Amino acid sequence: MKFAVQVLEGPYNNEASDTAYNFIKAALERGHQIVRVFFYHNGVLNVNNLADPPQDDRNVYARWTELGRDKGIDIVACIAASKRRGIKEGHIIEGTRISGLGQLTDMAIEADRLITFG
Amino acid sequence: MSDEMDNGGGENRKKIAFVMRRAPHGSIYSYEGLETALIVAAYEQDLSLIFTGDGVFALIAAQDTSALGVKGFIKTYRALDGYDVNKIYVDRESMERRGLKPEDFIIPVEIKEAAQIAAIIEEQHATIPY
């Protein structure tokens, strides 16, 4: 099945980002396809490359890089939401990109299931 | 323009519903939700907007955000008509429990019972909650 994933919450303050990651990992392991991950609202904070979380906890940012760079999943932060929150090109983690709401529309059309976290 | 617009999405035209659940102010969900709806509308999809819970407050015509110091966006709802988006549904119980009537809203809406809204959601290709 083709899944599209929307994340509306930033990391650490809320479990949505963790749950989305775990869902994607589980879906990939079962042979499903992830059309795209789209970050909206505070979700865009997931791609902030200035963050430096404590070493003894999970690194939410590294997880997204793992999925984007290593697994080849298209991971997009909404440009309008990013501009509001100080997220911009040059300051985003590897394996992610910034683009418009058309990317959300496209994945909603293309995927069999669109799942929102947050 | 309706016929052309209706066919604009071609074979890829999908039923997509937004479920607006939160009050228009106090968080950005409602505002950014409307922004997304307008983008999807521009892609000429078969769009529905469903207002339930505190989401029904978003449609009140008589809003003044000046005391909040935030930009109001109630008039933006009128832009939906320009994209031929007229499937605007309001949950009757949510509306009545908040003392609201259809005349209070900025755009024409269809009042639906909870079971009818469930059926509308059931027939969508994608449902996007804000």
Image: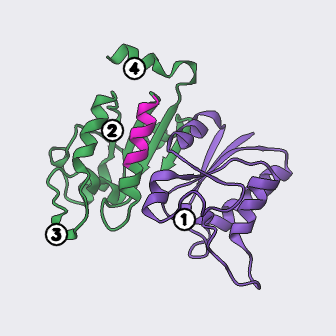
Chain colours: A purple, B green
- Crowding at dot 2, Cα within 10 Å, few <14 / some 14-19 / many 20+, comes out as some
Report the front residue among A115 and B56: A115
Task: Describe the element under mark 3 as helix, strand or loop.
Answer: helix
Earlier sequence position, callout 3 versus callout 2 = 3
Disc with the residue nearer the chain's start (4 vs 2) = 4
Dominant secondary-structure state across the stretch colored magenta:
helix
Indicate the chain on which mark 4 is placed. B
User: What label does residue B5 carry, if any?
Assistant: 4
Percent position of residue A116, x then y? 58, 54
Q: CA distance from mark 3 to mark 1?
A: 27 Å
SS at mark 1?
A: loop
| Viewer can see residue A118 | no
For badge 2, the amino acid type reads: Ile
**Crowding near the residue tagged with mark 3, few <14, some 14–19, many ≥20 C-alpha atoms within 10 Å:** few
Q: Position of residue B39 (x, y in %)?
A: 43, 39
> Are discs 1 and 4 less than 8 Å apart at CB?
no
Q: Is residue B36 magenta?
A: yes
What amino acid type is highlighted by mark number 3?
Ala
Separation of disc 3 and disc 4 at Cα?
39 Å
Chain letter for the residue marked with disc 2 in the picture? B
On the question of residue B105 being in view, the answer is yes
Q: CA distance from mark 1 to mark 4?
A: 34 Å
Write the start and end of the magenta stretch as one range. Answer: B34-43
Secondary structure under the numbered disc 2 in the rendered image? strand
Determine whether label 3 and label 2 are within 8 Å by CB.
no
Q: Secondary structure at mark 4?
A: helix
- Residue at the (22%, 37%) spot, across then down: B108
Q: Which mark is residue A9?
A: 1
User: Label 1 to label 2, Cα distance in Å?
Assistant: 27 Å
Q: Which residue is mark 2?
A: B88
Residue receiving disc 3: B67
x and y percent of residue B114 in the render?
A: 40, 47
